[in-house]
Amino acid sequence: MNFLKLIRYQNLLMLALMQVVFHFGFLKKQYPDLALADWQFLLLVLSTVCIAAGGYLINDVFDKSIDKINKPDKVIIDKYIPETTAYNYYIVLNVIGIGIGYYLSDYIGKSSFSGIFILIAATLFLYALSLKKSLLIGNILIAMILAMSILIVGIYDLFSIITPENQQGLGVLFKILMEYAFFAFLIGLIREIIKDFEDIKGDLEHGVKSLPIVAGEKNSKIILSILLAIAAISLIWYSFVYLFENDLYFAVLYVFALILAPIIYTLIRLWGSSNKRDYSHLSLVLKGVILFGILNILVVVYNIELVKQVA
């Protein structure tokens, strides 16, 4: 159980669910003959999960001294799992993840794509080692990796089967994935900055240049408010242009109730937050926003089928 906690199994389950939803609930329904067979796609999910788990693990190894200040009750390295054992786990997870990535890349005839897995693993290592201490760089990288976990589904499912005949249709599908990836990036970035508020005490003692430390609490909240406003406006625009105009009223209701409302709540509650407990609550709310944002694609697909039946 300590190992599962170390690799953040809840986050990994959400990551796996996210990829499964886009493959089975969206792409496969729109274009059944995808590049990867279902069992190969599940290997892609396993690869992604292994590399992400390795990232969480190595981050805890490098952060053990900070975690003793920020979250002493949740420290696992050296308390339950020796550091040397953790390094061994890290190596095994990355070997599995990168190995599967190479096999899948070779299968679709794009061996160079295996570099994506190597790049992500290396980025997570550098993030844990030093980049997370730099102003906003670590936040942006983690948000980009979250977005990439969506795009990689499209890359491996669609890229190698594009022909002049289906290019336009598959291009539309990939564009939709890009829009969801952008949303995940934006909310992920906001969440990472909010998590920096949680860790101010330990970060101060270890020279971490997080946004709240460098810019101050008020200025950081202004930046977060702008990002949250952009997310809210984008959702409203998306709802009216893509959903409301196509009579997808159930999907509109879903977006407003389970995605837009929590974002507005976060924006309002942010200015009344002042302690670790408050920011932890907002971080949890935004994790829910990411989850419901991803599940939205299932609601849209269902609503489209419903409209066709009524018509």
Image: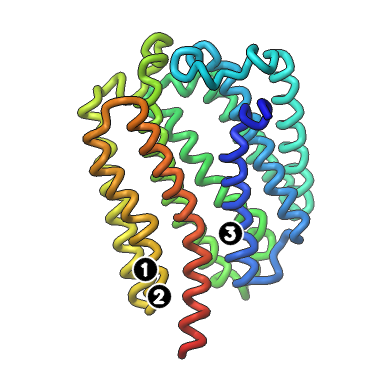
Q: Residue at x 43, y 50 (%)?
A: 182
- Per the model, the C-alpha gap separating discs 2 and 3 is 19 Å
Q: Position of residue 93 (x, y in %)?
A: 72, 31
Front residue of this view, candidates 279 and 42:
279
Q: Residue at x 28, y 37 (%)?
A: 224
Q: Residue at x 67, y 17 (%)?
A: 80
* Labels 3 and 1 touching (C-beta < 8 A): no
* Labels 2 and 1 touching (C-beta < 8 A): yes
Question: Where is mark 1, residue-wise?
Answer: 252
* Labels 2 and 3 touching (C-beta < 8 A): no
Mark 2 residue type:
Leu
Mark drawn on residue 22: 3
First in sequence: mark 3 vs mark 1 = 3
Q: Position of residue 122 (x, y in %)?
A: 61, 28
Question: Where is mark 2, residue-wise?
Answer: 248
Mark 3 residue type:
Phe
Q: Position of residue 229 (x, y in %)?
A: 26, 48
Q: Is residue 287 above or below residue 56?
A: below
Q: Is residue 122 visible?
A: no
Question: Residue 179's quadrant in the figure?
Answer: bottom left
